[in-house]
Image (tube, rainbow, N blue to C red):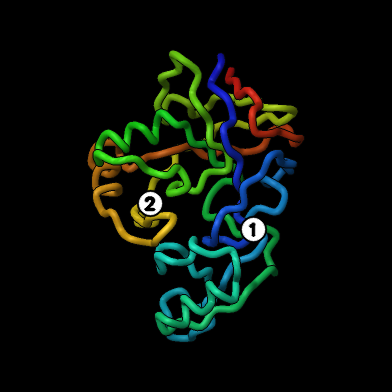
Amino acid sequence: MDVGTIAALWRYPVKALRAEPLAQATVLPDGLAGDRTAALVVESPTHARAGKPFRGKESSRLHLTADPETAASYAADDGVLVTLDRSEPRWFDARPVSVLLDRWVHDVEALVGEPLDPLRWRPNLYVTAAPGFAKREAEMVGLTLRAGTVVLEVVTVIRRCVTTTWDVATGEALPSVLERVATQRANVVGVYCEVVTPGELARGDALTAE
């Protein structure tokens, strides 16, 4: 089954910070090489997330920079002390690889009435759907995906939070994004995958499913 073509590849070297675009990627058993290998961890002892990563949920500006020092200054503006932590191999919230189809983004654009940058959903693989491919996220769970020499298994849908309301260029909020996704799409945009076969993939590769 032809799912589509990989239109963009992104990794996030520091969790919650700005994406790094890739022309090609090495996919390891636990995700894209270099993806989320560091995080800003809250040091403020009285903060609700003390000892845990400071996330986009806590700050609408983190994704505006790739520089940990700048991001730490944003946290400090909110009275939160954070430090860069590389003690964990990965800082995932859930599964190692996320996939987003353009038609799902177009669904949300139609609901809110304006164009939306796919980076609001922080995918690893952004895919231009093949003509006629019309599966929603829940219908893809259990499918095996292939691109380049990589094999992925779709294991769950991605349920969304307030971070999708932040404009990726300004940090300005558009609450209707999450409101419409919650009420019209069961709070789902995108799918999570596990890595079945590590390998290489690239922008422009075909994505197929079986």
The kind of secondary structure element at disc 1 is loop
Residue 13's disc is 1
At label 2, the amino acid type is Thr
Figure quadrant of the C terminus: top right
- The residue positioned 42% from the left and 82% from the top of the image is 77
Q: Give the mark, 2 or 1, whose residue is nearer the N terminus.
A: 1
x%, y% of residue 101? 47, 31
Judge whether 168 appears above or below 207 on screen.
below
The kind of secondary structure element at disc 2 is helix
- How crowded pointer 1 is (Cα within 10 Å; few <14, some 14-19, many 20+) is rated as many
x%, y% of residue 28? 74, 43
**Mark 2 vs 1: CB contact within 8 A:** no
Comparing 140 with 176, the one in front is 176
- The residue positioned 29% from the left and 42% from the top of the image is 181
Q: Which residue was labeled with disc 2? A: 164
- The residue positioned 60% from the left and 46% from the top of the image is 10
Q: Write down the quadrant of residue 88 in the picture.
A: bottom right
Comparing 155 with 8, the one in front is 8
Q: Write down the quadrant of residue 137 in the picture.
A: top left
- From mark 2 to mark 1, how far is it between C-alphas? 19 Å
Task: Specify whether 156 is left or right of 14.
Answer: left
At label 1, the amino acid type is Pro
Residue 155's disc is none
x%, y% of residue 119? 47, 47
x%, y% of residue 194? 61, 38
Task: Specify whether 61 is left or right of 113.
Answer: right
Judge whether 99 appears above or below 55 on screen.
above
Figure quadrant of the N terminus: top right
Task: Specify whether 95 is left or right of 131.
Answer: right
Q: Write down the quadrant of residue 195 in the picture.
A: top right
